[in-house]
């Protein structure tokens, strides 16, 4: 039987600032009419006909090496893949890419990962940094460790395996924000190097900026803003970082912000240190 095709005309869009990056025409979608089965009488004595969709042409191939996805553009290529528990999945490429969004926002998407003991000032720095960048007209979003556990990660405990999953999810969400062109500020204890390094590996080189709040345990415990150290010392909290669970400081982070009795910079001063780094690396312009 002759194939019947419904062809959708190619559509292209343009917007201010996109003149040099015209999106590719959308792929064609067609339908093929399959041979009808043996005639069967319907209400009007007509045979049943079935339509099956033709798989749409994709413009990307997904290749997995060491459980990481590498996306390569190509003409008329598609490859089914398995990633974790997800099977038969294909990466769908969007005609509006990261560089378009960065041009729109006039900044470069990245992840500023603030790590340190509880009470080291991570959340305070995140807020000061977000405010300072906002005053410069830059778009940010904070992923605070406690806030994320109110929703996305509310099903996770503080056991080692759940800690790892907590950081993995935050890393994946931070990656999406960075891809959107947003400066994502993740403020999480993230005590284990392997988990932080796994989040770093999700992003292009340079887009993961690790900021270590190098504050001694005794200072953090003296502050104890949430009263957690007191509870941990009393044995009411088990597996508390710095007390009966380890914290592994970064070995090769981008920024170290030390605080001790002699050196105690204000949140605004620390935020300016981070902004200076972003300016030096050209993240505050497209």
Image: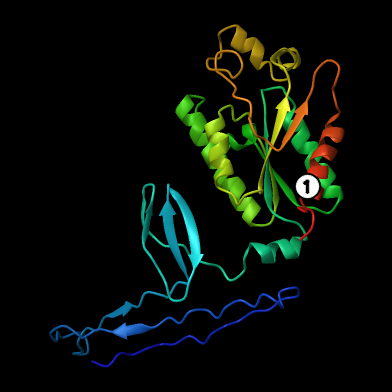
- Residue occupying image coordinates x 69% and y 20%: 226
Q: Residue furthest top?
A: 234
Q: Is residue 152 visible?
A: no
Graded by Cα atoms within 10 Å as few (under 14), some (14 to 19) or many (20 or more), the crowding at tag 1 reads some
Where is the N terminus found, in terms of image quarters? bottom left
Q: Nearer the viewer, residue 87 or 35?
A: 87
- Residue occupying image coordinates x 50% and y 32%: 164
Q: Nearer the viewer, residue 262 or 124?
A: 262
- Residue occupying image coordinates x 52% and y 79%: 26
> Dot 1: what SS?
helix
Q: Residue furthest bottom?
A: 2
Where is the C terminus found, in terms of image quarters? bottom right
Q: Residue furthest front?
A: 252
Image x and y of residue 185, in percent:
70, 42
Instruction: Give the mark count.
Output: 1
> Horizontally, is 239 left or right of 211 in the view?
left
Q: How is the image coloured?
A: rainbow
Q: Quadrant of residue 151?
A: top right
The residue that mark 1 highlights is: 278
- Residue occupying image coordinates x 79% and y 22%: 259
Q: Is residue 171 visible?
A: yes
> Horizontally, is 30 left or right of 52 in the view?
right
Image x and y of residue 133, in percent:
82, 47
Image x and y of residue 148, in percent:
60, 37
Residue 203, placed above or below residue 218: below
Image x and y of residue 30, in percent:
39, 83
């Amino acid at each position: 039987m002759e194939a019947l095709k419904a062809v959708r005309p190619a559509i292209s869009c343009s917007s201010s600032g996109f003149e040099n990056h015209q999106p590719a025409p959308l792929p064609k979608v067609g339908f093929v009419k399959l041979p009808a089965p043996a005639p069967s009488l319907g209400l009007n004595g007509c045979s049943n006909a079935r339509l099956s969709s033709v798989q749409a042409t994709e413009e990307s191939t997904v290749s997995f090496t060491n459980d990481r996805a590498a996306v390569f553009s190509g003409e008329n290529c598609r490859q089914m893949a398995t990633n974790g528990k997800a099977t038969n999945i294909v990466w769908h490429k969007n005609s509006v890419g990261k560089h378009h969004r960065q041009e729109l926002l006039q900044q470069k998407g990245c992840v500023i990962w603030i790590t340190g003991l509880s009470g080291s000032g991570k959340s305070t720095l995140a807020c000061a940094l977000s405010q300072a960048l906002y005053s410069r007209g830059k778009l940010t979003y904070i992923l605070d460790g406690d806030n994320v556990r109110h929703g996305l990660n509310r099903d996770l405990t503080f056991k080692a395996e759940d800690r790892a999953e907590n950081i993995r999810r935050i890393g994946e969400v931070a990656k999406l924000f960075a891809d959107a062109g947003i400066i994502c500020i993740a403020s999480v204890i993230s005590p284990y190097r392997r988990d932080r390094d796994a989040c770093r590996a999700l992003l292009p080189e340079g887009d993961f900026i690790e900021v270590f709040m190098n504050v001694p345990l005794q200072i953090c415990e003296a502050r104890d803003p949430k009263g957690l150290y007191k509870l941990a010392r009393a044995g009411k909290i088990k597996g508390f970082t710095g007390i009966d669970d380890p914290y592994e400081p970064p070995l090769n982070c981008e920024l170290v912000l030390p605080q001790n009795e002699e050196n105690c910079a204000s949140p605004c001063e620390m935020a300016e240190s981070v902004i200076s780094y972003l300016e030096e690396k050209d993240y505050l312009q497209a």
